[in-house]
């Protein structure tokens, strides 16, 4: 017997969901594997379940069916999309076809006996997708964090993001240092001719952004997209288009509503990009925004100086993983050559303490390249790819991409740990 057709149903009306369930109870070749009530849940269900067919209502809260369909079609081409609607205008149907909808069912004419055959018909109409063309899925989230002090975390985040972009990925670099973020300063994104007045200050206004529309959010991002004569000498000719979400203008203390909307924003951005790279404020793990970004992270890169206090902060951070369902395998430690004591071996120190982590590498001591990059505004993975610093960042990215995912996301994990630590300190 062949595998059943796996379907997901997404509608905010119980009557429609119940109608589908009753109609498919006796269809042994069809299996309902997931049910959702809005467009955002639809995307999450497709990402986790990879169904053969998804049925989407059009008028739903949070994210409507057509917007969800467009994102699913672009990132999950193996899933056939059908819409449930009473709208049959020519313009509407042409729009649905353009974004990748394969079929539709008229809600007003929907009869139980028709549903099983409709599922089979839509399943057979799925476009051919080569096995060599995998689903893009939702964005992979990488977080760069310095547990204690400034050890060059922003520099590492920027150069990893540039390398991912040069490899052809759609990358968003998010500056979550809410007090003194400097990604925009390092990249000098205003060199692209973008005036601040033309852009929504997303993170400053996040508390009031109850309706997160993709077009509005995209317009609030900045671009690092040098071309032609704007490129530094020796830069690769491959297309580079890195998007940046800058830190808020001025000091910002996040409220509960702000943090809640940040989670919604991350979920939206995950449908828009291949990679999201967070640059966190050093030593600010108690910020809810930092904890939330770690909830979504598949890879965590800890950047640290090599003095005892900094290494101890790394050890305590990774040891805290034992209180959660995560393991240290998702953590890579990047050791800055600054404050390194002669004869002291940080790797051996971590090994003796049995610090749980995936890997430990040392950032090369290359002050000339670092100074040139800082003063010019050009990341060394773009302007000086043969330098030791650039090779280190390039290899870091390539190694991370070659590794198999080691743990699944655990939504809320770091937020719960954050709350526990705050409570312990309060006592």
Image (cartoon, helix red, strand yellow):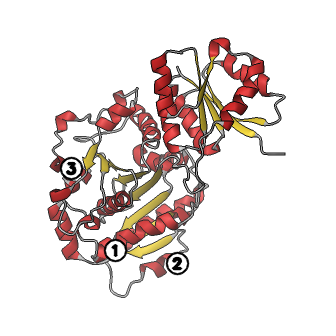
**Residue at position x 46%, y 59% from top?**
300
User: What is the distance, in whole Å, between disc 1 and disc 3 at their CAs?
Assistant: 24 Å
Tag 3: Cα neighbours inside 10 Å, few (<14), some, or many (≥20)? many
Q: In this view, does 358 lie to the left or right of 25?
A: left
Q: Is mark 3 on a helix, strand or loop?
A: helix
Residue 202 shows up from this direction: no
Q: How crowded is mark 1: few (under 14 residues within 10 Å), some or many (20 or more)?
A: some
* Residue at (19% x, 60% y) in the render: 231
The answer for how far apart the CA atoms under marks 2 and 1 are is: 26 Å
Check contact, mark 1 vs mark 3: CB within 8 A. Answer: no
Q: Give the percent coordinates (x, y) of residue 194.
A: 18, 42
Residue 320, numbered label? none
Q: Which of 74 and 147 is in front in this view?
A: 74
Pick the front one: 78 or 184: 78
x, y percentage for residue 216? 33, 31
Q: Which of 10 and 357 is in front in this view?
A: 10
Is the C-beta separation of discs 3 and 2 under 8 Å? no
Question: Sequence-wise, which precedes: disc 2 or disc 1?
Answer: 2
Q: Is residue 396 above or below residue 292?
A: below
- The residue identified by callout 1 is 391
Horizontal relation, residue 49 to residue 117: left or right: left
Q: In this view, does 384 lie to the left or right of 193?
A: right
- Residue placed under numbered mark 3 in the picture: 189
Residue 19, image x, y percentages: 73, 19
Asked if residue 370 can be seen in this view, the reply is yes
| Secondary structure beneath label 1 | helix
* C-alpha distance separating marks 3 and 2: 41 Å
Q: Nearer the viewer, mark 2 or mark 1?
A: 1
- Residue 370 falls in which quadrant of the image? bottom left
Residue under label 2, please give it. 351
Between disc 3 and disc 2, whose residue precedes? Answer: 3
């Amino acid at each position: 017997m062949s595998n059943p057709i796996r379907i997901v149903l997404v509608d905010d009306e119980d009557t429609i969901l119940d109608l589908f369930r009753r109609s498919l109870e006796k269809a042994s070749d069809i299996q309902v594997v997931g049910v959702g009530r809005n467009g955002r849940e639809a995307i999450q269900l497709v990402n986790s379940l990879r169904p053969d067919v998804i049925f989407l209502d059009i008028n739903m809260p949070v994210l409507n069916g057509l917007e969800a369909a467009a994102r699913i079609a672009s990132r999950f081409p193996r899933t056939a999309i059908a819409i449930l609607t009473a709208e049959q205008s020519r313009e509407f149907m042409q729009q649905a076809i353009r974004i990748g909808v394969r079929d539709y069912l008229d809600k007003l004419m929907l009869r139980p006996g028709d549903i099983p055959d409709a599922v089979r018909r839509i399943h057979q109409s799925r476009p051919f997708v080569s096995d060599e063309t995998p689903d893009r899925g939702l964005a992979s989230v990488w977080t760069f964090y310095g547990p204690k002090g400034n050890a060059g975390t922003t520099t590492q985040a920027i150069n990893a993001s540039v390398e991912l972009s040069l490899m052809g990925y759609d990358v968003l670099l998010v500056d979550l240092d809410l007090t003194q973020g400097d990604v925009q300063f390092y990249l000098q994104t205003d060199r692209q001719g973008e005036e601040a007045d033309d852009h929504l200050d997303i993170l400053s206004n996040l508390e009031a952004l109850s309706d997160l529309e993709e077009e509005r959010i995209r317009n609030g991002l900045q671009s690092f997209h040098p071309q032609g004569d704007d490129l530094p000498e020796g830069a690769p000719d491959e297309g580079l288009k890195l998007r940046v979400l800058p830190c808020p203008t001025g000091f910002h203390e996040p409220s509960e509503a702000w943090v809640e909307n940040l989670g919604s924003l991350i979920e939206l951005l995950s449908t828009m990009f291949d990679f999201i790279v967070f640059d966190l404020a050093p030593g600010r793990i108690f910020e809810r925004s930092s904890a939330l970004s770690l909830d979504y992270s598949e890879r965590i890169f800890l950047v640290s100086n090599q003095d005892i206090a900094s290494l101890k902060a790394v050890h305590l951070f990774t040891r805290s993983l034992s209180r959660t369902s995560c393991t240290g395998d998702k953590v890579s430690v990047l050791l800055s050559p600054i404050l390194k004591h002669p004869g002291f071996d940080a790797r051996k120190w971590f090994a003796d303490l049995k610090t749980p982590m995936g890997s430990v590498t040392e950032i090369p001591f290359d002050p000339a390249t670092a100074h040139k990059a800082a003063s010019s505004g050009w990341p060394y993975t773009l302007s000086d790819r043969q330098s030791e610093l650039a090779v280190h960042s390039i290899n870091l990215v390539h190694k991370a991409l070659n590794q198999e995912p080691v743990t699944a996301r655990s939504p809320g994990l770091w937020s719960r740990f954050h709350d526990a630590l705050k409570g312990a300190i309060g006592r």
